[in-house]
């Protein structure tokens, strides 16, 4: 069910929408729908709408793209190892960062115990997986 905005609550009850740019919508649709297994709700010549849990992710067509050097979207997962294995079986590789102690799966464990791994989409956008020790509610 879509949250709606009310005057007093501001955006507190509204559902978020994530946006990611792509230079090739068909390639992005295949990646998000097939490699990541997300539900593709709509595909137009201008955008591809996928569902990431309760979040709508709008992948929009752009003429030029300069990927940012930081994470632009991520998922909270209960089992990061299983998520990584599923991504790898679909041809997605985890990123490694110089100077960051990552294990053989590419997972970095924060001082608080959270586990994080990163990967790129076909446009070079940095995406992440996080296993929280105390999942947010």
Image: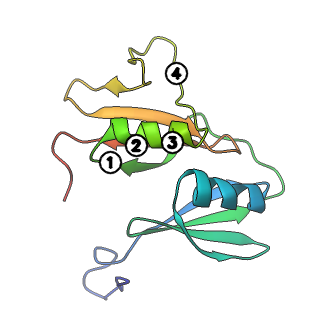
Q: Badge 1: few (under 14), some or many (20 or more) residues near its Cα, within 10 Å?
A: some
Residue receiving disc 4: 96
Q: Measured along the vertical axis of the image, is residue 25 above or below residue 41?
A: above
Q: CA distance from mark 2 to mark 4?
A: 17 Å
Tag on residue 77?
A: 1
Image position, residue 117 (x, y; %): 42, 33
Q: Residue at x 42, y 18 (%)?
A: 104
Of marks 1 and 3, the one in the foreground? 3
Q: Residue at x 73, y 42 (%)?
A: 66
Q: CA distance from mark 1 to mark 4?
A: 19 Å
Q: Reading the chain from its start, which is encountered first: label 1 or label 4?
A: 1
Image position, residue 31 (x, y; %): 64, 53
Q: Badge 4: few (under 14), some or many (20 or more) residues near its Cα, within 10 Å?
A: some
Residue receiving disc 2: 83
Tag on residue 87?
A: 3
> Are circles 2 and 3 on residues that touch, CB within 8 Å?
yes
Where is residue 116, by image quadrant?
A: top left
Q: Residue at x 59, y 61 (%)?
A: 33
In the rendered image, the residue lying farthest to the right is 63
Task: Report the quarter where the C terminus lies.
Answer: bottom left
């Amino acid at each position: 069910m879509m949250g709606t905005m009310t005057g007093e609550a501001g955006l507190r009850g509204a559902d978020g929408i994530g946006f990611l740019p792509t230079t090739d919508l068909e390639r992005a649709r295949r990646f998000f729908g097939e490699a990541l297994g997300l539900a593709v709700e709509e595909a137009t010549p201008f955008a591809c709408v996928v569902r990431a849990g309760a979040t709508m992710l709008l992948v929009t067509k752009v003429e030029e793209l300069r990927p940012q050097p930081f994470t632009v979207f991520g998922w909270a997962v209960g089992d990061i190892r299983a998520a990584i294995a599923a991504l790898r079986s679909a041809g997605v590789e985890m990123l490694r960062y110089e100077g960051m102690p990552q294990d053989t799966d590419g997972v970095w464990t924060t001082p608080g115990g959270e586990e994080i791994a990163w990967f790129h989409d076909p446009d070079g956008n940095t995406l992440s997986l996080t296993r929280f020790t105390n999942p947010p509610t």
